[in-house]
Image: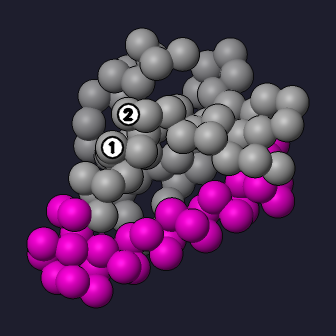
């Protein structure tokens, strides 16, 4: 199954990696590793996480206050946001 990032989700991912790397270089690598692990879980079990809306699901990223918001489409998983859980929970809705 293919993965597609919304452009703003890709920016969020890069900003989060940069933030953690600025705190401690290894943290940036650990964060991206957890994101990849979460994406692999989504690919294996796309329906496993709860719905936040009509067709948007959220998979929490282990060890970090982030979630991956995604939708399941025919041949791909579309990542809508790499959401900081301390942020306004509704901000991503304009992307769908």
Q: Position of residue 83 (x, y in %)?
A: 39, 42
Q: Quadrant of residue 11?
A: top left
Q: Which residue is mark 1?
A: 11
Where residue 24 sits in the image (x, y, percent)? 17, 82
x 63%, y 28%: residue: 56
Q: How many marks?
A: 2
- Dominant SS type (magenta): helix
Q: Position of residue 69 (x, y in %)?
A: 54, 38
Residue identifier under label 2 = 8
Residue range (magenta): 18-47
78 lies left or right of 33: right
Q: Quick check: can you spot residue 78?
A: yes
In the picture shown, does residue 21 fall above or below 92? below
Residue contact between numbered discs 1 and 2, judged by CB atoms under 8 Å: yes
In the rendered image, which quarter contains the C terminus? top right
In the image, taking residue 9 as reference, residue 59 lies left or right, namely: right
| Magenta run includes residue 27 | yes
Answer left or right for 95 relative to 91. right
Name the residue: 38% across, 33% down: 8
Instruction: Tell me if residue 85 is in the magenta stretch.
Output: no
């Amino acid at each position: 199954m293919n993965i597609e990032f919304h452009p703003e989700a890709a920016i969020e991912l890069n900003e989060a990696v940069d933030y953690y790397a600025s705190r401690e270089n290894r943290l940036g690598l650990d964060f991206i590793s957890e994101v990849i692990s979460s994406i692999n879980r989504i690919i294996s079990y796309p329906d496993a996480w709860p719905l936040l809306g009509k067709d948007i699901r959220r998979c929490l990223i282990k060890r970090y206050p982030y979630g991956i918001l995604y939708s399941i489409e025919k041949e791909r998983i579309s990542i809508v946001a790499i959401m900081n859980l301390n942020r306004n929970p509704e901000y991503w809705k304009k992307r769908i």
